[in-house]
Image: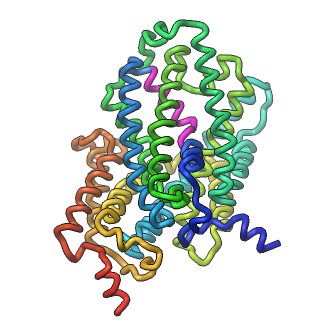
């Protein structure tokens, strides 16, 4: 029985995913789509529709999603080549202690957002049940139910997340398209496109920044998913299908729905269309397929920190604690802290992606245990790039001293990427090559 349980939850959190367990780009794409299609994505699309002309919203969507796909591809290639999670990949660029810091930041940040999203899930589902079915279930009970569902798939690991995504993503797609068809029956497409703005105007630049900022951290932890890719090509294609294809479609459909109904909230739109059951289904599936990814990546980070404890036990513990904290409403006080932690994640991707391009021969599991405790130059670059993120972020989350691309997370990634490339070329001591590894082995 114990062997069967271990086999079911085997997720290779501390070793490379074997090649016979790797997936093609099709299944990887579905997992990406499951993580991307969430209430936050439809709300963002609705905001774009409310504050922009449709043509401007489409332009901003394509540019922002294309840049996210590039970001995800650069990071996911490293995961596909090594078969390792983001915290372990970072060990090659930042050293063992640096990797522990990365693991802690990713684990705590995503664990926190798991609780925030769970709290939102309970509030939204309570509203749907009351408005549609006149059923009054305590919101805290709904939070606990959601926590159990989301922890279950994260507990099993990638296999369960993939199976849930294969089931949920087509249903979510059908519901969005069917809603689009229904709203367009009541008015012509040209009338919808010419609908006036219903909120403060949003410029194309700001819209691109919002789009990139919404999923920048998710793109950076791409190795958590792409370690299951058969080839780097599969990792890149799935990144583009998920971020450029899927995210673009969701944003554009949500923008059209917002213009046609003068509503931003996708659940409210579904209710307005008379699709009560559909509204509840899209709420449950969208939040489930996204939030189990948060807990999954968080548990991968905890696995590096507590490497003697099986991941499934860490997942259960994190899911339980996160659910109880959501029930207590404690996360509302943690959102500024979680935003602070999230700003530290994008430059991590810039450091390890650039380091991989300069030192590909180093990135193999056999070399992992021989990494030094710290790579000072890489740590410094991480710190400088994080500082850039805060100086380009508007108050209250940052200092707002200047702007680069308009998306602070993307700014931090670019700065870290460029500085790491320069450092590995110009500073011999910072180049983490096989020479450094051999020196460590001799010691």
Residue plotted at (55% across, 64% down): 300
Q: Position of residue 19 (x, y in %)?
A: 57, 66
Residue plotted at (61% across, 65% down): 20
Q: Is residue 169 above or below residue 144?
A: above
Q: Does the stretch in magenta take in 37?
A: yes
Compared across the picture, whether 27 is left or right of 369 comes to right
Magenta segment main secondary structure: helix
Q: Does the stretch in magenta take in 269?
A: no
Compared across the picture, whether 18 is left or right of 145 comes to left
Q: Position of residue 199 (x, y in %)?
A: 43, 19
Pick the quarter of the image with the N terminus: bottom right
Q: Position of residue 136 (x, y in %)?
A: 78, 32
Compared across the picture, whether 147 is left or right of 199 comes to right
Can residue 276 be seen here? The reply is yes
The residue sitting at the right extreme is 1
The residue sitting at the left extreme is 426
Residue range (magenta):
35-49
Q: Is residue 122 above or below residue 358?
A: above
Can residue 224 be seen here? The reply is no
Pick the quarter of the image with the C terminus: bottom left
Residue plotted at (43% across, 70% down): 99
Q: Nearer the viewer, residue 170 or 373?
A: 170
Q: Is residue 178 above or below residue 410?
A: above
To which quarter of the image does residue 284 belong? top right
């Amino acid at each position: 029985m114990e062997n069967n349980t271990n086999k079911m939850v085997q997720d290779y959190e501390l070793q490379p995913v074997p090649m016979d367990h790797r997936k093609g780009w099709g299944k990887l794409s579905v997992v990406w789509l499951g993580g991307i299609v969430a209430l936050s994505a439809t709300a963002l699309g609705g905001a774009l529709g409310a504050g922009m002309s449709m043509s401007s919203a489409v332009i901003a969507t394509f540019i922002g999603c294309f840049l996210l796909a590039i970001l995800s591809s650069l990071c996911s290639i490293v995961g596909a080549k090594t078969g390792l999670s983001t915290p372990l990949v970072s060990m090659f660029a930042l050293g063992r202690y640096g990797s522990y810091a990365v693991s802690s930041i990713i684990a705590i940040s995503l664990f926190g957002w798991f609780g925030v999203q769970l709290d939102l899930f309970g509030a939204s589902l309570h509203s749907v049940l009351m408005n549609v079915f006149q059923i009054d279930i305590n919101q805290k009970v709904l939070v606990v139910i959601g926590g159990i569902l989301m922890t279950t798939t994260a507990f099993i690991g990638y296999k369960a997340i993939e199976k849930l995504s294969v089931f949920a993503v087509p249903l979510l797609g059908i519901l969005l398209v069917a809603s689009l068809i229904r709203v367009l029956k009541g008015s012509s497409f040209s009338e919808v496109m010419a609908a006036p703005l219903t909120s403060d105007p949003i410029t194309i630049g700001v819209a691109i920044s919002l789009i990139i900022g919404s999923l920048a951290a998710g793109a950076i932890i791409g190795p958590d998913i792409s370690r299951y890719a058969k080839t780097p090509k599969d990792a890149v294609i799935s990144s583009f299908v998920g971020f450029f294809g899927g995210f673009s479609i969701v944003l554009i459909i949500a923008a059209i729905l917002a213009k046609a109904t003068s509503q931003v909230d996708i659940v409210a739109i579904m209710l307005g269309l008379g699709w009560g059951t559909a509204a509840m289904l899209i709420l449950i599936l969208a939040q489930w397929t996204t939030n189990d990814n948060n807990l999954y990546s968080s548990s991968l980070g905890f696995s590096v920190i507590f490497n003697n404890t099986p991941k499934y036990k860490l997942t259960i513990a994190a899911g339980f604690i996160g659910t109880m904290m959501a029930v207590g409403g404690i996360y509302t006080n943690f959102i500024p802290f979680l935003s602070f932690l999230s700003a530290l994640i994008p430059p991590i991707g810039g450091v390890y992606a650039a380091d991989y391009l300069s030192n590909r021969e180093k990135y193999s599991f056999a070399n992992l245990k021989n990494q030094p405790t710290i790579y000072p130059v890489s740590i410094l670059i991480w710190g400088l790039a994080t500082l850039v993120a805060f100086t380009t972020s508007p108050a209250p989350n940052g200092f707002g001293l200047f702007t680069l691309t308009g998306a602070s997370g993307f700014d931090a990634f670019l700065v870290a990427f460029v500085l790491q490339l320069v450092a590995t070329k110009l500073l011999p001591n910072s180049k983490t090559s096989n020479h450094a590894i051999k020196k460590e082995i001799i010691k």
